Amino acid sequence: MNKGPLTDEEVARYSRLFSCVADPTRLRILSEIAGCGCDPVTVNELAERIGLSQPTISHHLKKLTGCGLIAREQQGRTVTHTVLPEAFAELRAVLQMD
């Protein structure tokens, strides 16, 4: 990220990222994954830990993946999700004010 005012592209990207984490359920999911050391986690594990249905968790994971905040990896029939720390480093950089 450059110093100075954000470009139009940066504004669009960061507003999309912040909008994605503004949803309480998505923020809760991110917190749960990060709280477990950012280890890969399945939809069923998250549903059990958070107490929401598998379809609800899947919906929010799809949104988080689409925004580039988490990665999805499939091995056979098992799908796991992990936090992408570089996206959060970008958000932190945007929020830093000198």
Image: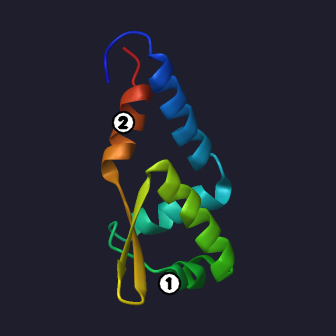
Residue at the (50%, 33%) spot, across then down: 14
Is the residue 5 above or below the residue 11 in the image? Answer: above
Q: Position of residue 30 (x, y in %)?
A: 49, 60
How crowded pointer 1 is (Cα within 10 Å; few <14, some 14-19, many 20+) is rated as: few
Q: How is the image coloured?
A: rainbow
- Residue 71 in sight: yes
Callout 1 amino acid: Glu
Q: Which mark is residue 90?
A: 2
Q: Position of residue 89 (x, y in %)?
A: 33, 40
What residue does disc 1 label? 45
- Looking at marks 2 and 1 on the same chain, the residue that comes earlier in the sequence is marked by 1
Is residue 76 positioned above or below 63 on the image? below
Q: Is residue 27 left or right of residue 6?
A: right
Local packing at callout 2 (Cα closer than 10 Å; few below 14, some 14-19, many 20+) is few
Element on which disc 1 rests: helix
Give the farthest residue toward the bottom. 77
Task: Count the marks.
Answer: 2
Q: Is residue 52 visible?
A: no
Quadrant location of the N terminus in the rendered image: top left
At label 2, the amino acid type is Glu
Q: Position of residue 63 (x, y in %)?
A: 58, 57
Query: At x 49% / y 68%, what residue is drawn?
Result: 32
Q: Residue at x 44, y 28 (%)?
A: 95
